[in-house]
Each structure stands twice: as C-alpha cells, then as structure tokens.
Amino acid sequence: MTKVADYDKNVFINCPFDDQYRPTFDAIVFAIHDAGFRARCALEYGDSSENRFSKIIQIIKECKYGIHDLSRIELSKVGRKSLPRFNMPLELGLFLGSKEFGNKKHQGKSCMVVDRDPWRYRATISDLAGQDIYCHDGKPHGAIREICKWLTSTSPRNIPGGTLVSKRFRLFQKQLPVLYADIKKARADIVFVDYARIIVEWLKFNSL
C-alpha cells in the first residue's frame, strides 16, 4: 500500500471500473504516473473484511489530488425500475467535503471534474454550477489531454503535454503483451496493482 508520506504525489481516481470504461481508466492511470504522480483507487484493496466506503475515505485522506469522472451518471436497471448510479458523485462529495472541512493540509486539495461534455452535469448536479468541467469526449486520449492540462495548472511540477503522453501511451500499449508475459499473467488476470507496477517499471526504462 502507498505510504501517507506520498500525499503530495497521490491522485485519487473516482470513475467506473467496468470493461466499457477500461480503456479510459488505463489511459488515466498511465497519464498520472507519466507525469510523476501515483494513481490511487479503491481497486488497490483486496481485503474483503474492510468496508468499501471506509477504504475510499482512507484513500481520499492520503491523496492531495483527485480525478472525478461523472460521465457515467446514467440509468441502470434495478428490477423493473431504472435508477441512476450515484457512486461517483458521492465520492466527489467526500473529496470536496474533506477540502472544505479538513485541516490545513486537506484544504490544499485539488480536484478535476470530468464529463463527456461541459454542460451535461447541470441536469444531474446543478450545485456544481460555476466549477470548471473538463471534457474527455469519452475517449482515452481525450482523458490524457485533459489530465495533462489540469496537472499543469494545479501542480508545481513540469508536466509533459497531452500529445506527447498520448504517443507514449500508444507505445506502452504495444508493449503490454510482452510485459504481461514477463510477470506470467494474461490480460484477464491483471488487477490494478499489477497494472500500476507494470507502468512504474516501464517508466524506469522509458523516462522523459
């Protein structure tokens, strides 16, 4: 598990974890690490004895930065009813609450709110009116572009541009089958901690 001492490098990812979103999620994790930060999310925990909500709270405590993707606030079937999924807005609320009511360290948190287009959120979370919304067009390279813009504006680091990071991500993807083979796993066996470690190792030999 990542140490709390890495607070200023930790980026909390609040997004869907299904197969449809997987290409965008993979791109987000890569972009975060390529910019010199560390991706954190609920998937890093494998202990079933821990409550999921408690896990998320703990991760938010350990992260200065947060990426919150609201693009999948949509209806899902529950029995005969269609109900919206509110996990992402809930986690965004936790992050904003920690910034508002936390101690001095947490008041310095910074987050990025992402959607498919700049106005859709007004129909679902109108209280966010006035917030800067980043739009990734539902595409992995759009997510990389927006993350690089956001990190450039919010962190003191020298962040590479989205065009370069997208090019590096494509190269990384081409090499993934070999990298999976190196750890004796198929793509279907890869979990978040595996993927993050593979990125870290790749970056050691492919640094900017």
Image: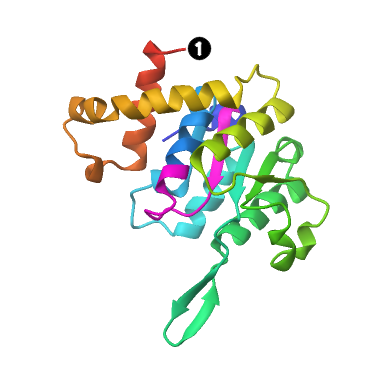
Asked if residue 126 lies left or right of residue 45, the reply is: right
Q: Along the line of sight, which residue is nearer the eye, 150 or 118?
A: 118
Dot 1 alpha-carbon crowd within 10 angstroms: few under 14, some 14 to 19, many 20 or more: few
Q: Residue furthest right?
A: 130
Tell me residue 129's x, y (percent): 81, 57
Relative to 53, say whether 163 is above or below.
above
Q: Residue furthest left?
A: 184
Tell me residue 65's x, y (percent): 63, 37
Tell me residue 207's x, y (percent): 46, 12
Q: Which residue is mark 1?
A: 208
Residue 35 visible: no
Quarter of the image where one finds residue 48: bottom left
What residue sits 52% from the left and 51% below the top? 15
Relative to 80, say whether 21 is above or below.
above
What residue sits 35% from the left and 20% below the top? 201
Quarter of the image where one finds residue 71: bottom right
Is residue 4 within the magenta segment?
no
Relative to 37, say whether 187 is above or below.
below
Residue 142 visible: yes
Kind of residue sitting beneath label 1: Leu
Asked if residue 193 lies left or right of residue 208, the reply is: left
What residue sits 73% from the left and 57% below the top? 119
Q: Along the line of sight, which residue is nearer the eye, 42 or 182?
A: 182
What residue sits 58% from the left and 27% below the top? 162
**Disc 1 on helix, strand or loop?**
loop
Q: How is the image coloured?
A: rainbow
Q: Along the line of sight, which residue is nearer the eye, 182 or 169?
A: 169
Tell me residue 44's x, y (percent): 40, 43
Q: Quadrant of the N terminus?
A: top left
Highlighted range, magenta: 9-24
Callout count: 1
Q: Along the line of sight, which residue is nearer the eye, 128 or 141?
A: 141
